Image: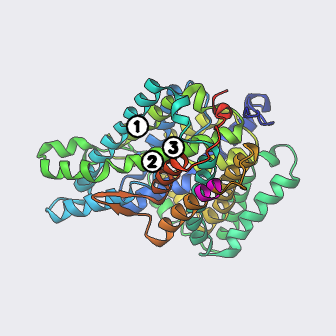
Amino acid sequence: MEIQSQQGIHDARTLGPVKFGILGIQHLFAMFGATILVPAITGLNVSATLLFAGIGTLLFHFIAKWKVPAFLGSSFAFIGGYLSIKQLGMDRGLSENLSLDYACIGVACAGLCYFVMAGLIKWFGSERILRYFPPVVTGPMVISIGLCLSGSAITNAMTDWLIALTAIIVVIVSNMWGRGIVRIIPILLGVAASYGLAACMGKIDFTPFQNAAWMGLPVARENTVLAVFDNPDYTLITSSIIAIMPIAFATIMEHIGDMCAISGTVGKPFLADPGLHRTLMGDGLATTLASLFGAPANTTYGENTGVLNITKVYDPRVIRLAAIFAIMLSFCPKFACFVATMPAATIGGVSLILYGMISAVGIRNMVEAHIDFIQMRNILIAALILVIAIGVKYGANDSVAIGSVHFSGLALAAIVGIILNAILPNRIDIDIEQYTN
């Protein structure tokens, strides 16, 4: 069964330069809230984060032959690693910035693991690898990605339900009953309406925006790994690599799920063309490069996949325009502060829809693949993937230790799903042509 090309806009240039630019801004805002949240939690530099989200996205598109409409933003999977190494470094008398630089070394090495996996896929062939990722595994994994993200959307929306509901209602109305440009920029309109309401209610503090400079360099030497080698602590470097590198296994599994979600959304077999090995290399290179310059690890962003699903505009050029905007804005601290004033409820309201769209893609993938849930093996695989991914996320702080290695719920669910699919009896032949033709 082939993936059917989805009806939509595959060349946004036909819409004209104004609409094309607005679509790029929409993708920028879709990724912004989550992207700057990671440096806010860890202490990494916000401007550097924006810069290397943009650069990483462009590198990813180059390696993926300009075909995959994915935006790369800050990965949440490495937050625990950053915080643990930061604390370990500060306990040894180092500054917060320098401790984070040591953590970045571990993340940079984790990015290199993507190249190892890409090499294996290239060597053995994508068809052999994708046999371990049939729709009965990837479908529940994609559903889990959206549901695991949903908690943060609810947490943000709960800060002010009126503002969150304003964003939700505007997005729905614009998408369902809008005409022309209104119908393809519902996320941007939802953000604008919700932000405007919050401003009118006096719930936004513009003081940081007023005090910020218009221009500034996004990267300083003390926030790069170069600072580590002025007086290196090799024990701490080793600890960083050992503690953080295994996280790459989890993020690689998430990458495969994201690529399946984007393929299902757009209706093109991206796992075959340009190939999973290329998308993995692009993601890994973006992560390693960002880490060397003190920015968070990158990952393909579900928020932007949700935008693709809502707007039906699948042109990768729009994503690249958003990446260029991110690079430009990384040199403007004032803009970063302005967007940072966006209410959490606005982010939550928009995210509720975007994350739900991701899960809906997973359901659609299984329906289109005609997964037979009369078979108990399929029920068991899907059930355990969903329960483990969501249960570990919300019941174990998204971390399960197996020996010295910590796994996120998504990574552990992927492992269990792959193993069960391989060993359970009465397995029917898996039709993988939907990803390879």
Q: Report x, y in % for residue 342.
A: 58, 62
Q: Is residue 371 visible?
A: yes
Q: Which sits in the foreground, 221 or 283?
A: 283
Count the labels in the image.
Answer: 3
Based on the displayed image, in which of its 4 quarters is residue 293 positioned?
Answer: top left
Which amino acid type is shown beneath numbered disc 3? His
**Residue 264: % across, % down:** 68, 41
The amino acid at mark 2 is: Thr
Mark 2 touching mark 3, by CB under 8 A?
A: yes
Is 414 situated above or below 68?
Answer: below
Q: CA distance from mark 2 to mark 3?
A: 6 Å
Question: Could you tell me how far apart the alpha carbons at marks 1 and 2 are, in whole angstroms?
Answer: 9 Å
Marker disc for residue 114: 1
**Which residue position is annotated with label 2?**
251
- The answer to which of marks 1 and 3 sits earlier in the sequence is 1
Give the amino acid at mark 1. Answer: Tyr
Disc 1 secondary structure class: helix
Position of 102 compared to 36: left or right?
left
Magenta-span inclusion, residue 6: no
Confirm whether the magenta stretch covers residue 378.
yes
| Left or right position of 380 against 12 | left
Is mark 1 in CB contact (under 8 Å) with mark 2?
A: no
- 396 to the left or right of 177: left
Dot 1 or dot 2: first in sequence order is 1
Residue under circle 3? 255
